[in-house]
Amino acid sequence: MQLLDVHFRVPLFATQLAQKWYYRIDFWNNRMHPGNVATGARSLKNQPPSMTATKDVLMTFRNGLASLLRPEDSVLVLIDHQPFQLANLHSHDPQAVVNNTTALAKAAKAYGVPTILTSVIAERGGLLFPQITDVFPDQEVIDRTLINTWQDPKVVDVVKATGRKQLVIAGLYTEICVAMPVIQALGEGWDVTVITDACGAVSTEAHQVAIQRMIAAGANMMTWLALVSEWQRDHARTEHTAEFIDILKHHAAGSGIAFLWEQQLLNTPVPGNAG
């Protein structure tokens, strides 16, 4: 006889999340085992709303080869990298954010990833950092009044027109202009990745709490160098090697200079024109 069937809602902050699981704890002979999605969904379907709110165990795991980012499936949105945002940026060194965002923009261009540039009230807050717009000199920057980028149809329509579902986002501030669109897009079924070191917040706490909040909502977290490496994926793919090394050399000093030194010691030429 089954004595008790309880479902708990458990947020995960340390796991990269992609598939949804329901866990059921059956107190029968003091045994606990995972229930399958169908069983969990069926038992919850017949529960009143007040019961499902406390008995729902929702866990989403991001794993498997298909969860890795691919340049042909990615679309990048850069949000509000503007001068006025730097005035109260305290989670990161401002120069680091400018450097990392520029590297991210260059990588997206090198790997053919469509990139949407957007600002908020640029007339008062300033134009996007020139290091970013110089990468896309002929591209229009979408200026908004909405704080939540994902509520602006001008931005969303351009993203949707790419036909891609791996949405990569970076912006200022993490806890406001990044968290809002990320959480909304996740709710609409997008696969969302946040590039944390191309973001920044008014405090370290604000940045960290925002990251926890977005992970709990199902977002994936990466740094710009991890993203570029994932887009490259295979050292045998040489079509973007020159750009990859050039980005490393200029924006990941430790890794880039070490690579050039390795080439020197091995007396091997740097691929392409990246020397």
Image: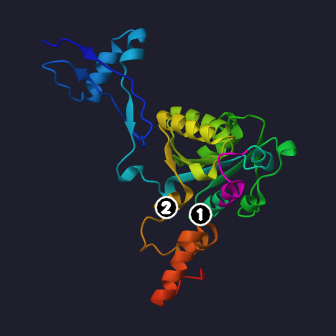
- 51 left or right, relative to 221: left
> Which one is nearer the viewer's eye here, 253 or 150?
253
Query: Which residue corresponds to mark 2?
Result: 231
Q: Is residue 220 above or below residue 260?
A: above
- Under mark 2, the amino acid is Trp
Asked whether 196 falls inside the magenta stretch, the response is: no
- Under mark 1, the amino acid is Ala
The C terminus sits in image quarter: bottom right
Residue drawn at x 55%, y 40% as measured from the top left? 211
Residue 247 image position (x, y, % from top left)? 60, 69
Marks 1 and 2 in Cβ contact (< 8 Å): yes
Q: Secondary structure at mark 2?
A: helix
Residue drawn at x 72%, y 50% as measured from the top left? 81
Q: CA distance from mark 1 to mark 2?
A: 9 Å
Residue drawn at x 49%, y 36% as measured from the top left? 189
Query: Which residue corresponds to mark 1?
Result: 107
Binning the other alpha carbons within 10 Å of mark 1 as few (below 14), some (14 to 19) or many (20 upward) gives many
